[in-house]
Image (spheres, rainbow, N blue to C red):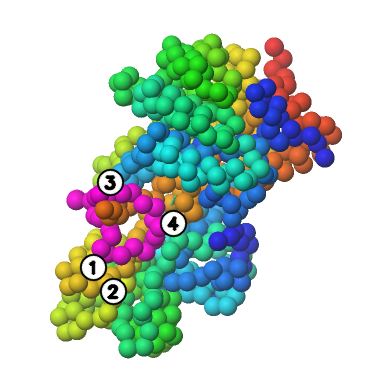
Amino acid sequence: MRREPAARIIGKRSWGDFHLLRLESPDLAAGASPGRFLMIRTSDGFDPLLRRPLSLHDAGDVWIELFFRVAGRGTALLAKKKEGETLDCLGPLGRGFRMDGFGAGRTAWLIGGGRGVAPLYYLARTLISRGAGVRVFYGGKTSAEIPLREKFESAGIPLDCATDDGSFGFAGFVTALLERALEGGRPDGLFACGPDAMMKRTGRMALGLGLPAQLSLEAVMGCGFGACWGCVHRIKKDDGGQWRKICEDGPVFGADEILWEEA
Amino acid sequence: MADLSTDLGFLRLRNPVLTASGTFGYGTEFLPFLDLAAVGGIVVKGLYFGPREGNPPPRLVETASGLINAIGLQGVGVERFAADVLPELRRRDTAVIVNVCGSGDEEYYRVIEFLDGHEGIAAYELNISCPNVKRNGACPAMDPRATREIVAGAKRRSRRPVIAKLSPNVTDIASIARAAEDGGADGISLINTLLAMAVDLDTRKPKLGNVLGGLSGPAIKPVALRMTYQAARAVKIPVIGMGGICTGRDALEFMLVGARAVQVGTANFVDPASAARIVREIGDYCDARGLARAADIVGTLKTGL
Ligand SMILES: Cc1cc2nc3c(=O)[nH]c(=O)nc-3n(C[C@H](O)[C@H](O)[C@H](O)COP(=O)(O)OP(=O)(O)OC[C@H]3O[C@@H](n4cnc5c(N)ncnc54)[C@H](O)[C@@H]3O)c2cc1C
Ligand SMILES: Cc1cc2nc3c(=O)[nH]c(=O)nc-3n(C[C@H](O)[C@H](O)[C@H](O)COP(=O)(O)O)c2cc1C
Ligand code: FES
């Protein structure tokens, strides 16, 4: 973990509200692994004040990629950045996906909803390079909300898409698509990132089937490196639950560790 | 190079920049980003006697140039602090100030009595802004008498200097500052966060799990500066100012209105090396202006009165 005050943008692509940035930084790349994230300043001044967390979407030897959706002021400012400009980044931070055991002869199913697909591309590439079989389930509200489908396809990563409005692929939630697929076969593990409701469903499905699942959680983050205790989620302990920091103990947790608040 | 050393009377610091409680973890979280020996000292996260759960999320909301937090002082308690954190901090060349919390006066005293048995602490900062169970949820810092009593009680028991940390959520900060001085405080620090809230119009729900929270960051600087000024005029003991400090110039403004030292809070989240940078910027300012000692600027505001 370190601060990279001036990572240069060396590539950019946009699809409506979704944007992909490639940053040049050997230091950020050196600490990269799937599921880890960066804290990024979106302005030079104090408004927005806090850094914004974004997952590593991919990484090479001297570069990293980010994929994000405009959600508010910070990400809107980030979307305006152009090639050649620099970003002030902190990271990589957090504990990413645990991939031990996922080599040749093992299969992993990855489930991503909306912007939650961001870390799954890097994860899919890494698992495949280790010899594991990978299948990605990718969902959004409309076909415009699953802009990465061509990127997955051109990398040769098996992909199943779902849209709420049926404008592309399976009509319905990506969790329903997953449920159907699970009737036909079982992977050795599930890896998911997306909105809370999706994570809750995926986690419950995995527990019901006795499948190990790793879920990447989100929270508003004050610091990203364990100092403010602002990013907690309820995690199981022997004596019940405990608030644990998503930025430091996560963002990836086992589905069997996570306690969901009753809504 | 200007002399940045700071004498609080009860404590000599390498420079006037401390890190504010709750924004610097237990100190060790920042080791990848800055050398603790570069700052005047660190104030660690508020400690109750036992471990604390804290509030349900969401715990943070960002506002215009500010942050509202309702962490609820989640923490490890004194035993684990003394066993796991203090030994690590003792190896670092920095003054460690412990922010002491309590849900009643007795708990503050128990924290102090326990920590008095351990080495490596320079002073206690009494966080008298904690909601107090016995006082109907009101915090001692809102009432002069309660402030005097709890400070006096802490002073009687402590073998170390006691700084009273004041809340801005009062009508007359000068009277609270004087009450802390009357109770025997060695110094006062201010301001803690301003009571605040944020709501979501569309869902009609509060944005914080705890409904109410405390506002910090650049948004509160003018209020903090005003209260530091008023408090410094009201007492003779040293005043430590804070609230929205992000740069060396911000820090020097607090010194100008009477603070002998400052604390850096929310800025630590944005730039984890803020405190060390602010020390450098204070030095640069003094050098550029030919000021031999940063301390010479303390309380030199020209009001024309
Ligand atoms: C570990 C982690 C990794 C993430 N990775 C990505 C990613 O790769 N791509 C991506 O598009 N997004 C990602 N996010 C979410 C992203 O951080 C938020 O969308 C962003 O911070 C919103 O900032 P803003 O200023 O644009 O919106 P704001 O105006 O601050 O907020 C807009 C809305 O988003 C909510 N929000 C704010 N911050 C967060 C947050 N940190 N998490 C969830 N909701 C939030 C607010 O409550 C509000 O409703 C990640 C979040 C976390 C915690
Ligand atoms: C997340 C957070 C946690 C805090 N926790 C404490 C605490 O434990 N004890 C305390 O006295 N003040 C606490 N504070 C208040 C700060 O120490 C400081 O008084 C306040 O934030 C104003 O300074 P700033 O604007 O520079 O942050 C906390 C502030 C924040 C933002
Ligand atoms: S974001 Fe500050 S502790 Fe996790």
The residue indicated by pointer 2 is: A190
Where residue A35 sits, quadrant-wise, is bottom left
Kind of residue indicated by mark 4: Glu
Q: Is A224 included in the stretch rendered in magenta?
A: no
Q: Nearer the viewer, mark 1 or mark 4?
A: 4
Tell if the residue under mark 2 belongs to the same chain as the one under mark 4.
yes
Kind of residue indicated by mark 3: Asp
Q: Are marks 2 and 1 in contact (CB under 8 Å)?
A: yes
Q: Which mark is residue B239?
A: none
Q: Position of residue A250 (x, y in %)?
A: 39, 60
Cα–Cα gap, marks 2 and 4: 22 Å
**In the image: residue A156, left or right of residue A234:** right
Q: Which mark is residue A248?
A: 4
Disc 1 packing (10 Å; few <14; some 14–19; many ≥20): many
In this view, B205 is above or below A208? above
The residue indicated by pointer 1 is: A202
Mark 1 chain: A
Span highlighted in magenta in the image: A239-263
Q: Which mark is residue B202?
A: 3
Q: Residue at x 16, y 69 (%)?
A: A208
Mark 4 chain: A
